[in-house]
Amino acid sequence: MPEDLVAIDGIILPGGESTTISMLLESSGTFEPLSELLSHGLPAFGTCAGMILLSNEVLDGRNDQRSFDRIDIAVRRNAFGRQIASFEKQIDVRGLAEPFQAVFIRSPGVESVGPEVEVLATIELDKEIEIPVLCRQNNILVSSFHPELTDDLRLHQMFLSEL
Ligand code: GLN
């Protein structure tokens, strides 16, 4: 709700369904004030659907779904397949000493990345194509997987350390 935005230092946009989150943000009157805060530099961490909401371009989205345009990536919704194609994979993350167990559930796939974006982790799909799965642009961090579904807090700590 808009009143919950008062005095926050940062925000985590979690996984879920980006179309539904977008709709609820609008119907609760939260989209515009949050968009305003983000455009003035509010730090944000978006995981999965949250990544979609922060990205500049959404492919395979609904026509009426909105995003905050805070990170210069194009993401395709459900790029790794349906719920049944969910998977986990150990990934190497730039800046972390040990691999991270990444949980992918109907995750978005990053199809292009602008020059300002740092790619902190990728996964290799068939055909030896590397797909970015963790990206950062200034104080906006996005992952196509769900760090909140494990007990590993290192990515949350990475985000908090930048607040
Ligand atoms: N497929 C969902 C979407 O498009 C994201 C899935 C998730 O957050 N696990 O919003």
Image (cartoon, grey):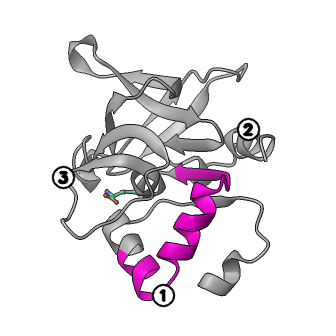
Q: Which mark is residue 28?
A: 1
Q: Which residues are magenta?
A: 23-46
Query: Residue at horizontal 23%, vertical 70%?
Result: 64
Sequence-first disc among 1 and 3: 1
User: Mark 2 is on which residue type?
Assistant: Met
Front position in the image: 37 or 24: 37
Q: Position of residue 79 (x, y in %)?
A: 24, 42
Q: Is mark 3 within 8 Å of ligand 1?
A: no
Left or right, 150 with respect to 159, comes to: left
Q: Position of residue 29 (x, y in %)?
A: 49, 85
Q: Which mark is residue 60?
A: 3
Determine whether 91 is above or below 103 in the image: above
User: Mark 3 is on which residue type?
Assistant: Asp
* Residue identifier under label 2: 158
Quadrant of ligand 1 in image: bottom left
- Residue 76 placement: quadrant: top left
User: Mark 1 is on which residue type?
Assistant: Ser
Circle 2 packing at 10 Å, graded few (<14), some (14-19), many (20+), is: some
Query: Residue at horizontal 76%, vertical 68%?
Result: 8
Q: Secondary structure at mark 1?
A: loop
Left or right, 36 with respect to 73, comes to: right
Q: CA distance from mark 2 to mark 3?
A: 30 Å
Left or right, 41 with respect to 39, comes to: right
